[in-house]
Amino acid sequence: MIRSRLGFALTILAAFAGNVQSAPLTAPQAEVVSHLAAAFATHDPVRVTQAYRDMGDYGLPAADIVESMVNTRGYELLGNGEIEAAIKVFDLNTGTFPLSANTWDSLAEAFMTKGEHESAIRYYRFSLILDPESNNAAQMIERMTVEQQFSYASDSKS
């Protein structure tokens, strides 16, 4: 079971990278991988979203890998300065994996990068609710709260 899950996950990662050299998969799994890889290759957020949602039960064994793969894509976009596209990718991940603290943390980081601190704080709080031990979320909330208070204090002196 673990070997087949790992093989499926690695095949998805290979497909995402555009290097489909697949391990033996069931026909439905192969179709999911092919569909997802083709969608990622288009860089069309609507098509990627639909392919992602179409994974259904066959995508579940590799859900954690898919979550990570999509998150990585979001960070690539964020690193390239494509903040709006990154937000869409992270939003897709939170919608698909709403109980993952990591997906909310990533969405919060994108909003923080955009300068929308209120949204970022809200999403960091979601992350913290799901993972109360998250030092990053707690630190980012504190940092932005202090920055907002400092900004309000500076504005009132002007």
Image (cartoon, helix red, strand yellow):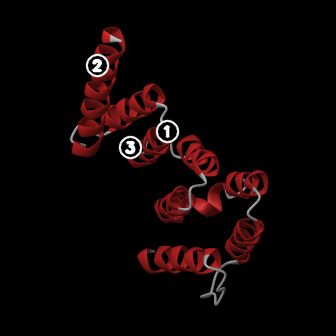
Q: Is disc 3 placed on a helix, strand or loop?
A: helix
Horizontally, residue 95 falls left or right of residue 154, namely: right
* Residue identified by numbered label 2: 149
Q: Which amino acid does label 3 sit on?
A: Ala
The amino acid type found where label 2 is placed reads Gln
Position of residue 67 measured from the top left corner of the image (x, y, whole percent): 51, 57
- The number of numbered discs placed on residues in the rendered structure image is 3
Report the residue marked by disc 1.
Answer: 111
In whole angstroms, how far apart are the C-alphas of marks 2 and 3?
A: 26 Å
130 up-or-down from 37: above or below: above
> Measuring 70% from the left and 66% from the top, which residue is drawn there?
40
- Whole-angstrom CA distance, mark 2 to mark 1, is 18 Å
Q: Is mark 1 on a helix, strand or loop?
A: helix
Q: Which residue is drawn at 44% across and 39% down?
A: 112
Residue 100 x %, y %: 42, 45
| Cα gap from disc 3 to disc 1, whole angstroms | 16 Å
Instruction: Please provide percent x and percent y for residue 86.
Output: 58, 51
Callout 2–callout 1 Cβ contact below 8 Å: no
Which of 109 and 21 lies nearest the eye of the viewer?
Answer: 109
Would you name the residue on which mark 3 appears?
101
Q: Residue at x 74, y 74 (%)?
A: 34
Q: Which amino acid does label 1 sit on?
A: Phe
